[in-house]
Image (cartoon, helix red, strand yellow):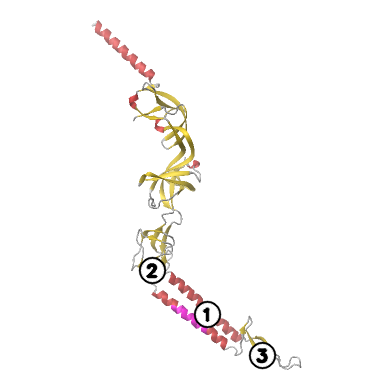
């Protein structure tokens, strides 16, 4: 019995020593089976801000085309997805009444021109030319001595009533001329043309439908110029102070997750967008080398905005860095296969990567703890 008790005491003592040893050794080394390994490499890295956004047309690249007059839609030449060029006819409103108004205005103009001619002809049979005061006619001075006897001169002739009649006829002519121009403008409104080149995004009317033009012109079609798109990125208020116009940006869309599009920050909206108590600012990113065959308005984007870039620095995954207070360290793999905790100093961050300023060298193998 004493022998068995002695063995149990020895076993307990050994177990305690093993536990104490492992406790003392912990913090310096870790079991290699709990880590995934990566090598420390040199490459370029840039400090960046991550944001989500949406592809949008630039101002003026999306136009709603409507009618400025009321009437029945006689012809509609637009379908969703069609490519149209600027000034191309996309719809026509019934215009027989407008053509009749133009014809009537032309007839009125001819009548008013004839009225002016009649007024002039009835004024004086010997008229030669019009002046600011009336008309010039030919007359003879009476005999007033040998020097001026029978001298023929041209002088202004005044007749108030006839002059008023001529001016009135001219005013009628100008009024009918203006009425003709107005009727021609109204007629031009019956032909609806594309104000920009682009793609038909929506059609909200059809042939045979009657439209009524009021304070708001009824929309026929919406045209989008797919070569003029931008990204509206929503940047958190904690990061907006680091965003500047001209900074480089990369973004991807869910449709093409493996393709990166490049751009630059063009504008920062001064007013915040608040949703569910989260404050964001709209940052406009202009797109370089836009491929209109790929991007479409309202696509969701993942945007990276770069503040600074550094070339040829040591870079590791951020997941490998462990924080303890103000200190940062990683687990470095030793030749024995175990992992030793080592303090490091870090620099700028970019997405899932971080720069190493000191504590590691190129080629070191570090461990990322498995979840």
Where, by quadrant of the figure, is residue 318 drawn? top left
Mark 2 lies on a secondary structure that is: strand
Distance from the alpha carbon under mark 2 to that under mark 3: 62 Å
Front in this rendered view, residue 331 or 209: 331
Callout 2 environment at 10 Å: few (<14), some (14 to 19), or many (20+)?
many
1 or 3: mark nearer the eye: 3
1 or 2: mark nearer the eye: 2
Horizontal and vertical percent for residue 144? 75, 92
Front in this rendered view, residue 136 or 232: 136
State the residue position of label 1.
173
Distance from the alpha carbon under mark 1 to that under mark 3: 31 Å
- Disc 1 and disc 3 in contact, CB within 8 angstroms: no
Front in this rendered view, residue 164 or 115: 115
Question: Going from the N terminus, do you reach mark 1 or mark 3 first?
Answer: 3
- Disc 1 and disc 2 in contact, CB within 8 angstroms: no
**Residue at the image position 45 percent from the left and 40 percent from the top:** 49
The quarter in which the C terminus is drawn is top left
Which residues fall within the magenta stretch?
103-114
**Residue at the image position 38 percent from the left and 45 percent from the top:** 259
The prevailing secondary structure element of the residues shown in magenta is helix
């Amino acid at each position: 019995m004493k022998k068995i008790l002695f063995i149990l005491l020895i076993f307990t003592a050994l177990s305690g020593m093993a536990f104490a040893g492992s406790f003392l050794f912990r913090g310096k080394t870790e079991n290699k089976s709990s880590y995934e390994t990566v090598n420390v490499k040199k490459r370029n890295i840039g400090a960046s801000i991550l944001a989500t956004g949406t592809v949008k047309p630039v101002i003026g690249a999306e136009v709603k085309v409507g009618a400025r007059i009321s009437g029945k839609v006689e012809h509609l030449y637009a379908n969703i997805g069609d490519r149209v060029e600027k000034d191309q006819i996309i719809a026509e409103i019934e215009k027989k009444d407008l053509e009749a108004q133009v014809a009537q205005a032309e007839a009125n103009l001819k009548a008013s021109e004839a009225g002016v001619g009649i007024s002039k002809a009835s004024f004086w049979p010997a008229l030669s030319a019009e002046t600011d005061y009336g008309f010039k006619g030919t007359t003879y001075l009476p005999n007033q001595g040998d020097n001026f006897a029978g001298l023929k001169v041209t002088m202004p002739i005044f007749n108030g009533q006839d002059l008023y009649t001529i001016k009135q006829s001219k005013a009628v002519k100008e009024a009918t001329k203006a009425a003709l121009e107005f009727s021609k403008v109204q007629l031009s409104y019956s032909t609806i043309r594309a104000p920009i080149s682009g793609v038909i995004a929506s059609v909200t009317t059809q042939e045979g439908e009657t439209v009524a033009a009021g304070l708001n012109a009824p929309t026929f079609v919406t045209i989008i110029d797919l070569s003029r798109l931008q990204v509206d990125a929503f940047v958190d208020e904690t990061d907006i102070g680091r965003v500047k116009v001209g900074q480089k940006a990369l973004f991807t869309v869910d449709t093409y997750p493996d393709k990166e599009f490049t751009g630059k920050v063009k504008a920062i909206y001064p007013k915040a967008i608040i949703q569910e108590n989260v404050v964001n600012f709209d940052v406009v990113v202009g797109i370089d080398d836009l491929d209109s065959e790929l991007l479409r308005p309202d696509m969701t984007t993942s945007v990276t905005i770069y503040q600074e870039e550094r070339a040829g620095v040591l870079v590791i995954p951020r997941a490998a860095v462990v924080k303890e207070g103000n200190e940062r360290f990683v687990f470095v793999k030793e030749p024995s296969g175990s992992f030793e905790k080592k303090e490091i100093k870090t620099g700028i961050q970019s997405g899932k990567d971080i720069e190493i300023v000191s504590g590691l060298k190129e080629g070191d193998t570090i461990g990322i703890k498995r979840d």
